[in-house]
Image (cartoon, rainbow, N blue to C red):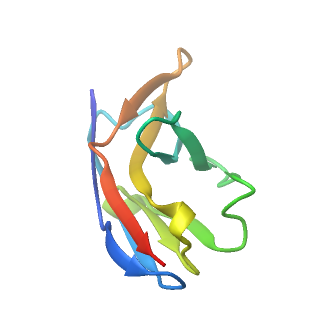
Amino acid sequence: QVQLVDSGGGLVQSGGSLRLSCVSSGIAVGITRMGWDRQVPGKQRELVVSIVVIGGGTMYADSVKGRFTVSRDGAKNTLYLQMNSLKPEDTAVYYCNAVRGPASINYWGQGTQVTVAS
C-alpha cells in the first residue's frame, strides 16, 4: 500500500502563490508516476501535472503551463506543486496521485482545498 498525505492549500488572492506538498509512505517501490489532479464540485477531476519518477519528465495541463511547477524530493518522499500567478479558476480541491506497478494502480491523497479570491 502507498499512503499519500497532501497539504498546503488555503485562501489566496488572485495573483498570489501557494505551495502544495505530498508526503508518501508505505510501499513506494514500483511507483512510476506521480502528480497532481484537481476537482471542482460538479465537474470531472482533471490532470494538473504528471511527473515520471525515473527521468523526471513532466506533463502539464495547458491551463497551468508557465505558472505551476512540480518537483520531487526523493530523500523526503515528498512531491511539491509550486503555484504562482493564481487565478480564481484555479480554485479546486487538489489531490496528490501516485501510480504504481505494471498494472498502474492509482493512489490518492485526501485532497487539499485551494481557493483563489478575485
Front residue of 27/87: it is 87
Front residue of 61/86: it is 86
Q: Is residue 22 visible?
A: no
Residue 66, quarter of the rendered image: bottom right
Q: Give the side of residue 59 with respect to residue 36, left or right.
A: right
Give above or below for 19 relative to 112.
Answer: below
Task: Pinpoint residue 12: horizontal percent, then vertical percent.
Answer: 38, 79
Q: Give the side of residue 71 with respect to residue 66, left or right.
A: left
The residue that appears at 41% across and 52% down in the rendered structure is: 94
Residue 22, quarter of the rendered image: bottom left
Task: Pinpoint residue 83: horizontal percent, then vertical percent.
Answer: 52, 73
Total labels: the figure holds 0
The residue that appears at 53% across and 33% down in the rendered structure is: 44
Give above or below for 101 relative to 63.
Answer: above
The residue that appears at 45% across and 45% down in the rendered structure is: 40
Q: Is residue 23 visible?
A: yes
Residue that lies at the very extreme toward the right in this rendered image:
62
The image quadrant where one finds the N terminus is: top left
